Image (cartoon, rainbow, N blue to C red):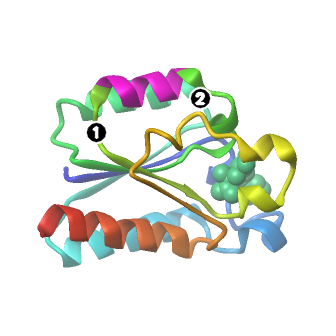
Amino acid sequence: MDVLVINGPNLNTLGTREPEIYGNTTLAVIEASLVAQGAAAGLDVDTFQSNHEGAIVDRLHAARSDGTRFVIINPGAFTHTSIAIRDAFAAVEIPFCEVHISNVHAREEFRRHSYLSDLAVGVLTGFGVFGYTMAMSFAVERLTA
Ligand code: CA2
């Protein structure tokens, strides 16, 4: 596929709790919308969610040989902890955009550091689930230009 959308831990429960922070859209709806947005531009989009760090590392390794040209990732809490996911991105050398639904800079101090941001093409944080749409628009622009 062309674009891989990865969501990390707990994001499978989107839309079911803490709607004041994360809204009430489910991950299934977000993923379907991104697949449609990519398809409208002639791009194949795959989606992946895991609560397990190693599974995300494995999926990134697989992306190296499955044709993935761009990754959109909301790493969830692994943003702030995972050198392993950082190292996987560095190894596969696939450009990526980091997305956060909430504004991580307006929350606890520990959310202000990301192990991924300096490797990312760009970071979208605080735009709600619209951040995923914005990231996909960027991917379409980049891959179809
Ligand atoms: O704002 C974001 O998108 C985050 O990546 C979400 C992570 C958090 O650890 C990051 O600091 C910022 C947490 C995801 C938790 O997912 C939930 C889903 C539904 C309800 C509650 C949490």
Q: Position of residue 70 (x, y in %)?
A: 28, 50
Q: Are the two marked residues, 1 and 2, in contact with CB atoms closer than 8 angstroms?
A: no
Whether residue 99 sits left or right of residue 64 in the image: it is: right
The Cα–Cα distance between marks 1 and 2, rounded to whole angstroms, is 21 Å
- State the SS at label 2: loop
Which quadrant of the view contains residue 127?
bottom right
Q: Is residue 32 visible?
A: no
Q: Is residue 89 above or below residue 83?
A: below
The residue where tag 1 is placed is 94
Q: Amino acid at mark 1?
A: Ile
Q: Residue furthest right?
A: 108
Q: Nearer the viewer, residue 55 or 41?
A: 41
Range of magenta residues? 84-91
Q: Position of residue 47 (x, y in %)?
A: 39, 52
Whether residue 55 sits left or right of residue 14 in the image: it is: left
- Residue occupying image coordinates x 17% and y 30%: 65
Q: Position of residue 78 (x, y in %)?
A: 64, 35
Chief secondary structure of the magenta span? helix
The tag on residue 52 is 2
Q: Nearer the viewer, residue 139 or 28?
A: 139
Asked if disc 1 is less than 8 Å from ligand 1, the answer is: no
Q: Earlier in the sequence, mark 1 or mark 2?
A: 2
